[in-house]
Structures are given as C-alpha cells and as structure tokens.
Amino acid sequence: MVNVDPMPDHRPLLQMQGIVKQFPGARALDGVDLEILPGEVHCLLGQNGAGKSTLIKILAGAHQPDEGQILLDGAPVVITHPVAALTLGVATMYQELDVVDGLTVTENIFLGHELATAGFSQRRAATRRTRELLARLGHPDISPHKEVGRLSAAGKQIVSMARALSYDARIIIMDEPSAVLDSEEVANLFRVVRELARDGVAVVYISHRLDEIRQIGDRITVLKDGRAVAQNLDVAQTPTPDLIRLMTGRSVDQVFPDRLPVAPEAEVLLRVTGLGLKGTFHDVSFEVRAGEVLGLAGLVGSGRSEILETVYGARTATSGTVEVAGRRTRRGSVKSAVDSGVGLCPEERKSQGLLLDEPIYRNITLSAFARFASAGFLDESAERRAAQQQVEALDIRPHDVDRTVRTLSGGNQQKAVLSRWLVHGCRVLLLDEPTRGVDVGARAEIYSLIRALAAAGTAVVVVSSEIDEVLGMSDRVLVISEGQVVFTSPAESIDEHQVLALVMEGSAA
Ligand SMILES: Nc1ncnc2c1ncn2[C@@H]1O[C@H](COP(=O)(O)OP(=O)(O)OP(=O)(O)O)[C@@H](O)[C@H]1O
Ligand SMILES: [Mg+2]
C-alpha cells in the first residue's frame, strides 16, 4: 500500500463531475463523479459493464461525455482527442491492448512522439529510452527492435506500460493491466506504481482482483450500473466483503466449488506424451480423465499457453503425441483436434476469439455451426435459443443476443468467448485464462460451470496466472517452468507459496 499523506488542504489534481455517457441502447454513465489526488493510487471498481472503461476513455479523450465537466487543477478542461489528453499529462493503458503488431517495440512506444520524422540520432535516443523503460519494468529481455506482434499478450502489456510511462504524465490510467500478467510481473508493475506515486503522479487503477486493490490502492470509487455508489473510500478501512456488496448488491461466496472424486477407472480422454515445441517447451507428458480438471501453473512465458495451443493443433508439435480418447490427433491440425472433440478457449480474445462486429449469438454458436445447420441453412432460432441460455447462465450483459460484441464491456466479451465452448460440448476443453477480466460475481459462476462440465464427463485443462485460482479450480496441478513440467501434484496437497517457489526456482535456474 502506498502511504501518501494528503495534506488537509490538498487540492484534487483532477475532478470529473456529473459525467453522462449515452450509447445507443446503453446509458454507460449516468452522472458520475471522480476525484483524484496527486500521488494517490485511485482504484475504480465495479462489475463487468459498470462503466469503468467508459469513464476512463472520457478522461483519455477517446470518448466525449454527453454531460458533465472535467477539472484539472481546479480549472475546466475539454479533452477532445487522445493527444489532447497526453498534452494535459494524462496517459492511458487501455484494457484492449492497443499496440500495433507490425511495428517494433520502440516504434510503438514512440508512436505519438513523432518518431517517423526523426533522424538517426533521435532514433538512437528513442531506442535507448525504450531500453531504460523496459528495464524499469523488469524486462531488459525484451528487445527494442522486436516486432510487437511476436510478443505474448503479457509482452504487449509491458510495451503498453512502457509507452504510458514514456510521457512523464501526471495521471496514468491503467485499465486492468494485471489481467495478462503473472505474479512476478504484477510485483514489477506495483513497484513502478509506488515509484510514480512517490513522485506525485496519480494512478487510476482498474482491476477485478481485490487482493491487488488491497496491496496497491489508496482510495476507491465503486461504480454500479453507470453510477458511483461509493466514492473515495479508504482502502485500509473498507473490508473486502463490503466492496463486493457495493459492486454486486449482494454478497458473493468466493469459495471454489467442491471437487468430485475422479474415478480411477474413468476414461483417459486426453493423453499427451513427450510433447515438444522446439524452443518453447519439451517433453511434456500428462493425462486427463473424464471428470477431471487439470491446472497448469507457471509464469507468463513458461510455455503454458503454447502447450494448450499445441494440443489444439494451432501449433505444430516438433515431438511427441496427443491422443484423445485413445486416438492420435494429427500434428498441427486444428481440424483433427476439433473433430476428436477438443476445444480451446484462447487467451487473447480480441485477435483469436471474437468476431467483434457480429451479434452475440453468432459469436457464441460459431464453432457449433454444424449442429445448427440443416440442409445448408442455419437454424437461427435454435442458435439464438442456445446463445440465450448461455447469456443467462454466465450473466453476459446486456441479456440481448442481438447486440454486437464490440459494444460489450471487456469482461462481457470474455464471457462470450467462454460460453462458445460451453455450447460446443467438447470432450476435452482447454481453457486459457478463463476468468481474465471477469468480475467477482461472474467468476464464481464460471468456476461452478467448469465443475459442472467436469461432472458431466468432460476433461478440462485450465491455465491461469492466478495461482490460487489454478489450485482452487483443479483436481491436479502441473507446475511448468521454462517449458518443462517441474512438478505434479494433487491440487489439495500443494499451496500457493510452494507453487510460487517452484515457478521462481525453475525460472532462476
Ligand atoms: N461503443 C459502445 N456502444 C454501445 N454500448 C457500449 C459501448 N461501449 C460500452 N458500451 C456499454 O456501456 C456499458 C459500460 O461498459 P464499460 O466498458 O465501461 O464497462 P466496464 O466497467 O469497463 O466493464 P468490464 O469490467 O467488463 O471491462 C456496458 O453496458 C457496455 O455494453
Ligand atoms: Mg472495462
């Protein structure tokens, strides 16, 4: 926790007053106030769709408010454009990573700094500055010359952070920065946030992970359905259950659903033997039985996601085999994996998961097309019904299957990706970060859905950066470090600290 000691007469750095934002069909903000002090970490909490991203996009100049005003140092300002925000000293890291894949790390960081017209010496300076920023973020390993498209989601997030830092802003907005980061990287991020706060920079921090809010936050504003239901709460004085009640209007049982014993004679639905992907992971072997949830724990970059993608055939294994219910799937063939009943809910929803301009129901029923197609026609009403069920089960808001996915909040988009695989009815379900960006209420629902799928005989493999989540959701855990399985254990007989020690040890070796 950052200890700022605001002087009694300390003037707010920034005030947003009575902000209203109406989208077609959704009043995202209905008169919201926000007050930010210099040097504080101000947390913005609220369920998926509460209006958090909309509020900070207004501050960032990406949206215009319909009503309300913004005061900076007590004087009204109009932020007509993202560049105007930067000029006023407001830098933003968006929830939807907005780095440009085709450009290098340095080019991304200095995109707004007119590097295009810069001469050689300026480019050299930019590269040097990029190195400094990456080192500050604990990532001297990322090359300034690397094409951003070749980085992992976490790598992209780090570039986005470096870019926000490059502006020497007075206010830095971070919209769910930790969603793609592992524990080590979150620790790096927090160290930087504390340094910023010490220098008087205000950080607006959005996260669904309440333990993070406790660690890093000073004050909290809670949004619910486009209104601020609590303002400037002192983090230290506000117990977590109170926060949950403010956000959801109810108390949420955060406990993971009970595990059901996996019968030793249950069929092995997924058998991975000596699987390798050159340069990424090697000699990975495991089995998952019907009814079992296997968790893969490890740092970002440990090879977790690549293992899932290789099992799914999206990457071509360089060694080893994958068998589904006793039958080998073809290397590097998604079709072969899907035909045998394997589904993958990917980590990066924006690029891999969703058709942003299609309605919710299409996105949900996408991979199950065969089931809804009869004699070459899609049975739209069956599609809709199946989607409607999922929308309600996962509480995808709004409960309107005709809404375009682009207009959903980040967490609701994530739920749409997940529900597609639930409709699909896979025998083997691979889930990469299934609760990323999802609020506390919906998380509990996702946990019990995954349990219900397992109980119905699905073999589930789940990757999560949150170690407590991997342990809580899984029957068995594999710890992955540097592309190798370093430990296997029933989830009940290992705790968070042991897993952390294992992943760190492995990565230090
Ligand atoms: N471009 C848009 N068009 C229509 N509606 C939108 C648009 N952007 C957001 N909305 C709606 O505004 C509301 C608030 O969305 P917002 O993205 O601000 O939520 P959030 O609090 O950031 O949620 P999350 O935790 O899921 O990221 C939601 O109902 C969303 O569907
Ligand atoms: Mg959001």
Image (cartoon, rainbow, N blue to C red):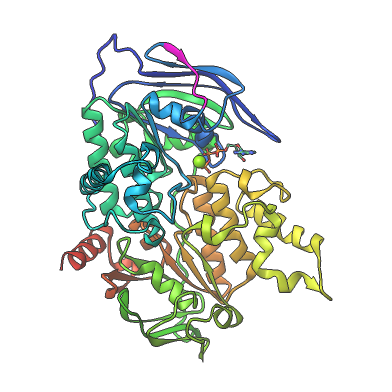
In the shown orientation, is residue 239 left or right of residue 200? right
Query: Is residue 79 within the magenta segment?
Result: yes
Give the x, y percent position of residue 384. Answer: 76, 58
In front: 365, or 220?
365
Instruction: Write the start and end of the magenta stretch as one range.
Output: 75-80
- Quadrant where the N terminus sits is top left
Task: Say if 96 sits above or below 101 in the image.
Answer: above
| One can see residue 261 in this view | no
Q: Tell me where residue 303 appears, x and y as whole percent.
A: 34, 69
Q: Quadrant of residue 379?
A: bottom right
Q: Is residue 196 magenta?
A: no
Q: How many marks?
A: 0
Q: Visible in this render: residue 429?
A: yes
The residue lying at 51 percent from left, 79 percent from top is 290
Q: Position of residue 66 (x, y in %)?
A: 62, 22
Instruction: Identify which residue is drawn at 32% across, 49% down.
Output: 106
Q: Quadrant of residue 102?
A: bottom left
- Of all residues, the one furthest to the left in this rendering is 509
Q: Nearer the viewer, residue 342 or 362?
A: 362
Query: Where is the C terminus found, in terms of image quarters?
Result: bottom left
Quarter of the displayed picture in which ligand 1 can be seen: top right
Q: Residue furthest bottom?
A: 327
Tell me if 416 is positioned left or right of 115 in this view.
right
Question: Image height check: is 38 above or below 130?
Answer: above
Report the side of 394 relative to 203 (left or right).
right
